[in-house]
C-alpha cells in the first residue's frame, strides 16, 4: 500500500511540472540598433548591446542604452546614455534608467536624472523624477522634480524647479 501511495505522489508532481509556463525572454538580440525616421530623415537612433523580448512584447535592455536625436538637417543635436532601459509596447514608450545623462551639444547643457521616458508617438520626453541641468557655458544649474520636453530637448518645461543663475545688468 505504501508503494502505491508513493507512486501516485511521484506521478502527481510530474504532472505539475509539465504544464509550467515559461516566463523568460522569447527573443535575445545582441547589438541592437533601432532607427526612427520621418519623411526619409533620421530623427532618433537607439543602440544597445542586448535586447530581450518577452511574451507581452515588452523589450528589456539590461545593458547601456545610447540614443542620438537629430535635427531637421540630420545633425545630432542631443545624445542620451543610461545604464539600462525597456520598451513598453502597450504604452509605446521607451523608459531608460540608471545614471541617465543627456547632453545638448549646441547649448552645452547636461541633464542628469535616474529615469527618463520617451514616446515615439507624441515625440515627447518626460519624467516625474528629480533631475538637474547644468549649463557648461554659464555654470547655471537648474534642479527640478519632473519635466516635459520635445524629443530633441529643444524646449523643456520643468514642473517644480529651483536653480542657481547668473544675472548681469545694472
Image: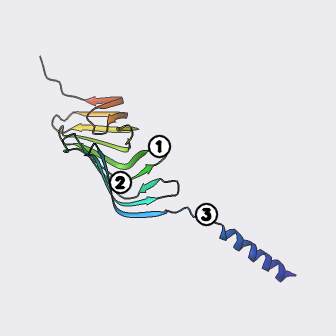
- Give the total number of marks visible in the rendering: 3
Vertically, is 42 above or below 166? below
How far is the residue under mark 3 from the one under mark 2? 30 Å
Q: Quadrant of residue 161?
A: top left
Q: Please report contact status of discs 1 and 2: CB closer than 8 Å, yes or no.
A: no
- Disc 3 is placed on an element classified as loop
The residue identified by callout 2 is 83
The residue identified by callout 3 is 21
Would residue 68 appear left or right of 113 to someone viewing this image? left
Viewer-proximal residue among 69 and 166? 69
Q: Please report contact status of discs 3 and 2: CB closer than 8 Å, yes or no.
A: no
Which quadrant does the N terminus fall into? bottom right
The residue identified by callout 1 is 91
Q: Earlier in the sequence, mark 1 or mark 2?
A: 2
Q: Quadrant of residue 167?
A: top left
Viewer-proximal residue among 148 and 45? 45
Residue at 70% across, 68% down? 16
Q: For the residue carrying disc 3, how many other residues have a C-alpha within 10 Å: few (<14), some (14-19), or many (20+)?
A: few
Residue at 47% across, 43% down? 91
Amino acid at each position: 500500500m505504501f508503494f502505491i501511495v508513493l507512486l501516485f505522489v511521484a506521478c502527481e508532481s510530474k504532472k505539475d511540472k509539465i504544464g509550467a509556463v515559461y516566463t523568460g525572454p522569447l527573443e535575445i538580440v545582441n547589438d541592437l540598433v533601432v532607427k526612427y525616421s520621418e519623411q526619409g530623415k533620421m530623427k532618433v537612433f537607439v543602440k544597445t548591446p542586448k535586447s530581450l523580448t518577452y511574451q507581452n512584447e515588452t523589450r528589456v535592455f539590461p545593458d547601456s542604452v545610447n540614443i542620438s536625436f537629430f535635427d531637421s538637417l540630420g545633425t545630432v543635436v542631443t545624445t542620451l546614455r543610461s545604464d539600462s532601459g525597456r520598451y513598453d509596447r502597450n504604452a509605446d514608450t521607451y523608459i531608460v534608467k540608471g545614471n541617465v545623462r543627456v547632453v545638448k551639444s549646441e547649448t552645452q547643457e547636461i541633464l542628469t536624472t535616474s529615469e527618463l521616458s520617451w514616446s515615439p508617438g507624441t515625440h515627447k520626453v518626460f519624467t516625474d523624477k528629480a533631475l538637474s541641468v547644468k549649463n557648461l557655458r554659464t555654470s547655471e544649474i537648474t534642479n527640478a522634480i519632473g519635466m516635459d520636453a520635445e524629443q530633441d530637448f529643444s524646449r523643456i518645461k520643468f514642473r517644480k524647479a529651483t536653480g542657481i543663475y547668473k544675472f548681469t545688468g545694472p
